[in-house]
Each structure stands twice: as C-alpha cells, then as structure tokens.
Amino acid sequence: MEKRFISVREELTKKDIEKIEKEIEYRKLVVRKEAIEAVKEARAQGDLSENFEYYAAKKDKNQNESRIRYLERMLKTAVVISEDSKDDEVGLNNTVQVYFPEDDMTEQYKLVTSIRGNSLKGLISIESPLGKALMGHKVNDTVHIKVDDDYSYDVVIKAIENTVDDGSDAIRKF
C-alpha cells in the first residue's frame, strides 16, 4: 500500500518564523550536543540490554531530531502572513471579548496563528471556525460561526484590544 503525505501549508508571521529558527538553532547547537553526550555516557555503563539510561537517552536524542525535522518542514511549507489589521477590526494577535447569547456568557480570546493555538489558555487559531469567523469584524457585530453542517452558533463582539505578539505564546509541540 502506498503512503501519501498531505502537505500542510502553515500560515506564519515573520515573528513565528524567527521563533522557529531560534528553536532550531538551539536544538542543533545545544540540545543535540547534550543528547549525544548523554547517549555516550549511558553506553559507557556497559550491558545495553538492560540499560534504561541508554534507552532513555536515545529516546531523548531521537525526539530532539524529530522536533528539528518537524520545525524545518514547517518553515519549508510556510506562507508568510501579515499581522496588520484595522484598529477597529478583529485581526491577528488581537484580544477579543465575545458574548455567547446561547449561554449568556462572555469569553476573552486572543487570535493567533495555528502553531500558537491553545484554547485552554484562551489562544484561538485563526484557522479554527471561531477564529476564521471573527476576523475582520467590528465591535457589536453579530458573527455566525459554522462548526460543521450540523452545528453553528452566533456570538457578539463586545470589545477588541489591539494587542501585539510579544513572543510569549509558545509554539505547539507537534
């Protein structure tokens, strides 16, 4: 059976790319050296058949190499997008207060690129249904969010804060 890989084109900002490049450099120059040294030390302890430290060191080394490949592949397929948006419209890196009439509650989200999305921390990807729908709208707009063919809902934008990318939002692991 033939394997097919789907090429995903990540939408990244210039700051995302800089952050990824720094992580790659750190992993190649620091983490890689430490991981190789840990494997050498564990191997020197003798019998590899029951050497947990050796297998753990090899696993760490392999995970680092996988992360480097993942980040490099992300950069190769990246599409650079702008962080610019009008002051009165929802845009990338803006913090938005959203009212959910169905639940009678208000939530606050920061719209970020997909590699920084973390809904548990209020970071919503611009590729998610909510993120896509909010982009370009203004305060007091009612926005219809279509999750799939069977489910959709409305929200009202209550406030938009023009925040910037300060670099503190972490890049997702995989």
Image (tube, helix red, strand yellow):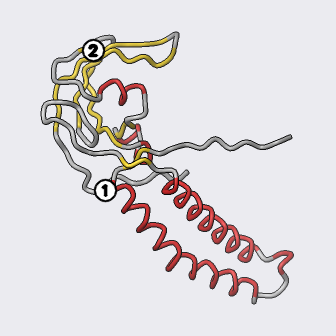
Q: Position of residue 114 (x, y in %)?
A: 43, 42
Residue 88 vertical position relative to residue 46 in the rendered view, above or below: above
Q: Position of residue 164 (x, y in %)?
A: 21, 49
Q: Residue furthest left?
A: 87
Q: Where on the picture, by quarter, is residue 33?
A: bottom right
The numbered mark at residue 76 is none
Left or right of residue 89: residue 55: right
The numbered mark at residue 104 is 2
Q: Residue at the location (25% across, 20% down)? A: 99
For badge 1, the amino acid type reads Ser
First-in-chain label (2 vs 1): 2
Mark 2 vs mark 1: give the one in front: 1
Q: Where on the picture, by quarter, is residue 130?
A: top left
Find the distance from the CA under tag 2 to the CA under tag 1: 31 Å
Instruction: Tell me the SS state at disc 1.
Output: loop
Instruction: Tell me the SS state at disc 2.
Output: loop
9 or 99: nearer the eye? 9
Q: Residue at the location (29% across, 45% down)? A: 82
Q: Residues within 10 Å of mark 1 (few under 14, many from 20)?
A: few
Q: Which residue is mark 1?
A: 168
Q: Position of residue 12 (x, y in %)?
A: 39, 49
Name the quarter where the N terminus is drawn: top right
